[in-house]
Amino acid sequence: MATAYDNFEKGLGSGGAESGSEGKGNEDQIDVSQNVSTAPPAKRFEAPEFIRNMTVEERARVELKLRRKIDLRLMPMIVLMYIMNYLDRNNIAAAKLAGLPEDLKLKGVEFQTSVSILFVGYVLMQVPSNLFLNKIGKPAVYLPVCMIGWGIISGATAACQNAAGLIACRFFLGFIEAAYFPGCLYYLSCWYTRKELGFRTAIFYSGALISGAFSGLIAAGVKGNMDGSLHLRAWRWLFIIEGAITVVIAFAAFGVLPNFPRTTTWLTDEERQLAVWRLEEDVGEDDWVDSQDQSFKTGLKLAFSDIKTYVLMFLLFGIVASGTVTNFFPTVVKTLGKGDVETLLLTAPPYLLAVITTFANSWHADRTGERYFHITLPLCVAIAAFILAAATTTTAPRYVAMMLMVPGVYSGYVVALAWISNSLPRPPAKRAAALAFINAISNTSSIYASYMYGSGAAPRYVVAMSVNCAMSAIAIISATILRLILVSLNKKLDQGIFVEGAINSGTTEAGKKGFRFRI
């Protein structure tokens, strides 16, 4: 599989589709008479004339320049926005150590409810938001507007005086924040080919990991230096500062973020044509054209009728469920017996390690075109970390477990996110619906997980760690099933059998090169 694909990549830079096994790259080797079902007529795509006239070396050089231009325009801003998205969502964990429960007189499970209620709103809005984004085709406007909304709500949390106010703010925060993460996953898939998507997804998700590291550092600084300033407790300053920064960054994003390749204005005509052609060439179908071609109903129907959507749903659910420990990570680290400020500082190293392992794992996954082992092997490390955390109360082994559980979960998670777009590449309405649906369902785990980290379960959190192990195992099983499905579909493509959702015809570049699903 890799040989033909690598040869094609050398010839066309990174614009090519995946290849089948060696020797299947020629169009005349696909015997359409073997089809067991009648394939619909395929639209013939042809590269713009200026691309056809390029030599292989010219094409590679021009495409590299375009890709760098897209990276510099798109990636820094969406990472910065996601840092604030994650900070505003998870700063409540640090606020707990800065006096929030005492000031609001929280009782029983009221704090856990304030954490979990965010994900109710988060789950409800993801699919409608992504379909709406796909319909209007204006991510450069839609995402910053949503960011302003959640920044204001996050800042307003500082004014809460009781549990009811806190729970209301958290619900609406999740409701607005729901637009960003699945929206950005879809956004990236509209700019990058499948070969490029895994590493860019890792860069994007590094925002969450960086925010996890800096959240503790920021909270430690605020608690140590601002508690009581202007008669406000440290946790109130935490919400005010982070909410204000979010709004400022959102306004800056209006002038930086592009829309989709066809509708953006900061590329030249030739660059825009090349950006569009790369995606057509990759999977044999045009991507986002205009809002008239994007149907809510069609996108939902296509996503829900594909069995791969449900297998991917269980895969992502298992990973996200096992990663819910990060919602209470300062609380878990607190069981090491350190002071509040020292505890907040100790939360940073596991996230910094996760940034490194996530980049390395996703880079290698894109380099090799392999997905399955880049997801399952890190999860095996996570399972070992959860077992170690539940099995001992000794400080050193417990912190080793904490250092490993975050990288173990999230190194495979970013590859799994890219696997969604790889396995459900087109049409864009289907991809948008599937990304949002899968992400929404996976985050339902955060609703119940909050109640597993009560003070009575400390320090080992045996039930929570056991559930995390089971969820990681479910993710591994789901990845195995998906791999078997994709291998089977690739074998059908080898035989010239029509496969719904794949590129079955030699009339497209992807078809000519032997499109295969990534496994």
Image: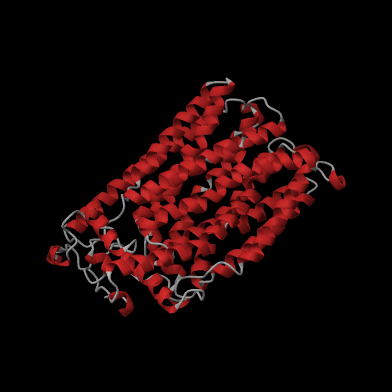
Residue 432 is drawn in which quadrant? bottom left
**Residue located 17% across and 66% down the image:** 27
Residue 44 in the figure: left or right of residue 440: left
Q: Which residue is found at the position 18% from the left and 57% from the top?
A: 494
Locate residue 333 relative to residue 9 in the image: left or right. right
Give 164 or 265, whichever is nearer the viewer. 265
- On the image, the x and y values in percent for residue 16 come to 30, 63
Q: Position of residue 278 (x, y in %)?
A: 36, 68
- Is residue 120 at least partly visible in the picture? yes
For the residue pair 255 and 10, the one nearer the viewer reads as 10
Residue placed at 56% from the left, 68% from the top? 140
Is 48 situated left or right of 132 in this image? left
Above or below for 146 versus 414: below
Image position of 68 (left or right of 6): right
Q: Residue at x 32, y 69 (%)?
A: 58
Q: Can you name the residue that lies furthest to the right here?
A: 231
Q: How many labels, in total?
A: 0
Task: Residue 154: give x, y in percent of width and height.
Answer: 70, 53
**Residue 284 in view:** no
Location of residue 342 (image quadrant): top right
Q: Position of residue 231 (x, y in %)?
A: 87, 45
User: Colour scheme in the image?
Assistant: secondary structure
